[in-house]
Image (cartoon, helix red, strand yellow):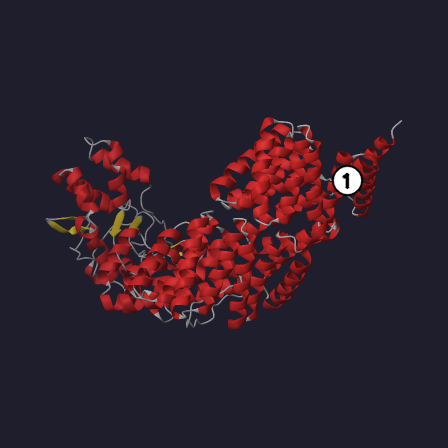
Amino acid sequence: MATTFKLLGPLEVWHDDVLVPVPAGRARLLLAILLPHANGQVRPLLPGTASCPVVVTSRNELRGLSVLDGARALRLDVLAPAESAALLRAALPGDDPADLAEPAELCGHLPLALRIAVANAAARGLDAYLAELRGGDRMSSLAVEDDPQAAVRTAFDLSYRALDDDARRVFRLLGVVPGADFDRDAVAGLTGDGTGRALDRLVAANLVQHDGRGRFGLHDLVREYARELVDDREAAEGRARLCAGYLSRVVSASALLYPHAQLRTAGLDVEPGPFADRDEATRWLEAERHNVVATIVAAAAHGPRRYAWDLLFGMRVFTWARRLFDGWAEAGAAALAAARAEEDPVGEMAVELCLALHAYSLSRSREAVGHYERVIAIGDGGGFWPKGRAIALGALGSVYTEQGQLVLAARTFRRAHAADRAIGPRRGEAVSLTNLGVVLFDRGELVEARKVLDEAHELLVEAGSPVGRAMVLNVLGGIELAEGNAQAARELRERALELHVATGARRGQAATLDNLAVVACYVGDYRAAAEYAREALAVAEEADDNWNRIDALTTLGYVEHRLGDPEAALRRYRVALAAAVDSGYRLGEVHALTGVASVDPADEGAASAIGRAVEPASTTVARIVAARALAVSALVHRARGDLPAAREAARSALAIQRRHGYRSDAARTWLLVGQLVGGPEGRAALERGLRLTEEMGMPEAADARALLAASDGP
């Protein structure tokens, strides 16, 4: 067979330049066409006979060949890590296989880069070449010195030069995108115009990867190549547009989810984003949160610096509600350094608020207090950003609440409410009123708490804030339960749980599930209580929510004790106690100590535990908690044979409960007083307890009837 080929250039050929006479049916030939960048370069070379298959390798997709010429496309990805290591191991047999993972990673598992690395490592030694690759200029290192064609940059140049001007510009700008992936909206923001077709051309050229679900990305070596091409001016302009686009969507998405929240710093004006509903906003925030964090760090390092703190502040509520703090500390540190470098007090206040929220969520109370106090000090010092100061006051009150400093917490919340009222809009008042209502409830001021919370709920309904409404409904359920209305309490808390689940507020879900367990305990349904408490514990642990985890452990301890497993109960209480002490959660510590003492009041450790509980319970002015600790103290004194002390503790608990309207707790304590006092006075106490438990449908009514029957004697 006579076969003649003319010498071809780099595929800049047309049909008349090629002569391939192959007599039909007399020979088989495999034709390989390497690295064409256009369909028109391939078609003139196709023999048009089944006896001559053709293999075409290209960085471009060449989709037209599939449409018109019957080609079947096979997309090849980079090598898997194990395949990369195997290639290096075969070519560098004298090196330790354990040392080959890093060079494979630095080559991006790209076959050409790996072959270049093999050649250079053989010439220079693996250690010396690896140090060069680590040096930061991989594109220069991934080249063979005596052959300019044997270079990763040269291979990328071929694809880049084949692009039109619009696609080249988009590709260069993609080099400044700091995140791992991006969507079309991010590219539109980056370029400042509609560039969808240019992005598609980059995908077709295999310079941009597409996952088929709307997410795009660059291989890390391709990204490094793009960064080489973009100049400083073009990069700065693109980065500013990218940051502005991210900020617009962060604020718009968060506003749909958390309409009550402050999402903007002073003087910031943001265009509304494209989200149709809450679900779409949630999906976008979940998909982009890592990219936003990367953009914060990049803005702090390269500018525009203001976007570092604006983006951080805009993301803070979603990050807190979903407990998604990975990368948050590093981003916060970078943003704080940027604000200080710019000497921007508002920026510094915004970052301190974000860092405080992070510390608070990790139960680092002292650290959180320090951040909030710095915000207040900056605001007071120059009259900067009154809203930021009000946010810090409200959050500081929450920390004081967790620490059990309820008087200080109430005072701080009142300052926050005054600040919010002076600033407006009223949704800020709703937050401070909600927080104040929680503290008033803990202090036993149920009438005032209900009044404050009802006002807060009206404002939150007006603002369209489901998370805020859920918090209020949960506490109102606590008031109903304290007053003996279990059915109303359950209904309120079930509504709260629905709202928390709908918004994905994990902390709120954990708290509400635990409180539903408390309602179930109230009516004696301990099996249901156990289910609620276990679910609360699982949600809190998944969300790394320490305080709600402590509360759920304490509730589970109570439930397991009531179900007849004191050893399991004691284990739960002790785990909760250790966590509460470690995190500074004073009210949680008191609850756990009270539980430890209640399991076996005659145990030697019970007296020590309840002694540790009563004093802090009284000093925190958490009256419902103090009264319960006193009631358990009465049990401990009785077990030790000290009836006078037992009666005094029980009467003190009852006085608190009656004064503040804790009807359900008072009903139980009446029964305890009746047992401790005896005689006509004791019988009267038992009758009072029976009447209350029957009115409120409490399971303790059966205990009261049994005690009264026993007091009648034979």
- Please say whether residue 615 is visible from this viewpoint: yes
- Disc 1 target residue: 699
Residue that appears at 60% across and 42% down: 535
Residue neighbourhood size for the residue with mark 1, other residues' Cα within 10 Å, grouped as few (<14), some (14–19), many (≥20)? some
- Amino acid type indicated by mark 1: Pro
- Please say whether residue 539 is visible from this viewpoint: no
Q: Secondary structure at mark 1?
A: loop
Is 167 left or right of 496, judged from the image as shown? left
> Residue 95's image quarter?
top left
Is 469 left or right of 16, judged from the image as shown? right
| On screen, residue 565 above or below 541 | above
List x then y, in percent, for residue 272: 47, 70
List x then y, in percent, for residue 262: 49, 65
Total numbered labels: 1
Q: Quadrant of the C terminus?
A: top right
| Closer to the camera in the image, 627 or 516 | 627
List x then y, in percent, for residue 481: 71, 50
| Closer to the camera in the image, 73 or 148 | 148
Residue that appears at 65% across and 47% down: 624
Q: Extreme left residue here?
A: 146
